Image (cartoon, rainbow, N blue to C red):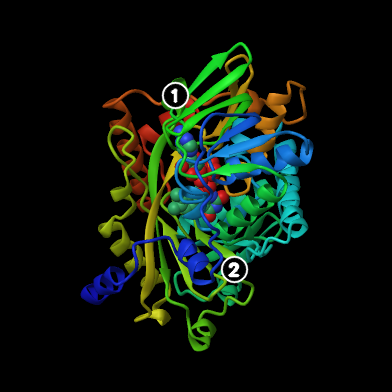
Amino acid sequence: MKDSIARAVAAAAPRPLWLDLADATGRTPEGAPPVAGDTTCDLAIVGGGFSGLWTALLAKERDPGRDVVLLEANAVAWAASGRNGGFVSSSLTHGLANGADRWPGEIATLERLGLANLDELEQTIARYGIDCSFQRSGKMWVATRPHETYELERMCGLAAAHGRRITPLSADQARARVDSPTYLSGALDEEGYALVDPVALAHGLRAACERLGVRVHEGTPVTDLTSTPRGIVLSTPYGRVGAHQVALATNVFPSLLRRLRLFIVPVYDYVLATRPLSPEELASLGWAGGEGVSDCGNQFHYYRRTPDDRILWGGYDAVYHYGNGLRPELDQRPETFLKLAEQFYETFPQLEGVGFSHRWGGAIDTCTRFCAFFGTAKGGRVAYALGFTGLGVASARFGANVMLDLLSGTPTERTELEMVRSTPIPFPPEPVRYLGVELTRRSMVAADDRGGRRNLWLRTLDRLGVGFDS
Ligand SMILES: Cc1cc2nc3c(=O)[nH]c(=O)nc-3n(C[C@H](O)[C@H](O)[C@H](O)COP(=O)(O)OP(=O)(O)OC[C@H]3O[C@@H](n4cnc5c(N)ncnc54)[C@H](O)[C@@H]3O)c2cc1C
């Protein structure tokens, strides 16, 4: 069995499924040209993932006359925005529990703003006719270890206390939705989650931006930001861009503001996708509702059906490389793919023999509070949003609005939030950073194996406000 699983993994293409789907359907847009010579603009945006694209689109919607330039080092959506699971969550705080712990006084507002952000995201997709398989299909959490049933009950209780409806499910009810013998119970959030093809969404956003007059330049790394009396000059290998204001949407990549580098570590997350399933294979799963699914250990899987009837299966290992390692070769990790594949067949034994078509990985911009933080620099002319920690598909849109609010200089409900005004605790320098991340990872694995009991290290992190509890 182990050999056949290894062969199934090896046969998969080492590339994100979503990029291949765009190519296969002829929907990959032509590359946008790099900057050619010096130019100027009102607002320059650095980064062509969801954060940058939403900032560009919202800037034009707020003020159609604003001259907006988007500079992307590689190609739109080549990084996290084109590699994710396509789970679109209303949460701005990486889950209600994390938000309620950190900002108990404003969690109701954060939940309301998060749901509004998800609704507006859906409306924008409809308004611009973006064909990205967006489906408000909800999410089911499943318990696969006895103590996780208790954690799901706690989650449902917390949701109820904050006016959110997350419905507890028995094992039979969970299995009636998606049939796995590993499920002990479940919980269903029907209002706060959607699924999307993220590359199709990013390409659609890019097209909408261009229609509104945004100048998009791919293949254009920004190497430096300098203040001048009239604004900010962005240096690129092909020319300088003089901008009145700048939004930094560079996520996990080394920030152009050096001080921000202390706040982010890249943590690699890996994903497999099966070949398209036959109608009989699909029938063996049930899964008529099409909801996204996730189990709920500290090391958890997330999985979903894709628009072309594959199963995307990701998560579990979270790998940090010494010195903030961020290199293309780290996108592939054979031992993680093998582990993921074995766990896939344990979850769905009825799919034994179904092979994988794609395997890929990507770096997650992890910060110590596990959700985005924001701010300005250079006299308020530069704004940034980063640290989405693996839940940024929808909250990147909120981050874009925060950056534009901050640049406008006028306080808004968003900019007055404690969550927006506070910053996370920075990571220590190496080698303490590596040792700390590794100790945390091992402790979380141990907690999963010991009925959820957190050891002294995790309890200390919890007390310091930097403990992760998925
Ligand atoms: C494997 C994986 C699975 C995930 N699954 C989910 C999920 O299911 N749901 C969810 O909500 N989130 C998920 N996430 C997280 C989510 O994808 C990210 O939070 C989100 O896409 C971040 O968008 P972004 O625009 O900030 O960053 P990115 O998409 O990383 O874009 C940043 C861009 O900035 C560019 N850039 C950086 N520096 C420069 C520079 N100096 N000059 C020019 N350009 C520059 C980069 O080239 C890059 O294109 C996942 C992430 C990964 C890696």
Pointer 1: what residue? 426
Q: Quadrant of residue 44?
A: top right
Question: Would you say 181 lies left or right of 379 here?
Answer: left
Judge the density around disc 2: few (<14), some (14-19), many (≥20) Cα neighbours within 10 Å.
some
Q: Residue furthest left?
A: 3
Local packing at callout 1 (Cα closer than 10 Å; few below 14, some 14-19, many 20+) is: some
Which residue carries the number 2 mark?
A: 170
- Residue 117 lies, with reference to residue 413, above or below; the image says below
Horizontal side of residue 333 vs 197, given as left or right: left
Q: Residue at x 56, y 65 (%)?
A: 27
Judge depth for marks 2 and 1 and give the one in front: 1
Question: Type of residue at label 1?
Answer: Pro
Question: The residue under label 2 is which amino acid type?
Answer: Ser
Side of 193 where 353 appears, left or right:
left
Secondary structure of the residue carrying tag 1 is loop
Residue occupying the point 70% across, 44% down:
213
Tag 2 near tag 1, CB within 8 Å:
no
Q: Residue furthest bottom?
A: 280
Q: Can I make out residue 352 in this image?
A: yes
Please report the residue visible at 66 percent of the width from the left and 25 percent of the height from the top: 418
Q: Nearer the viewer, residue 458 or 450?
A: 458
- Of residues 389 and 205, the one nearer the viewer is 205
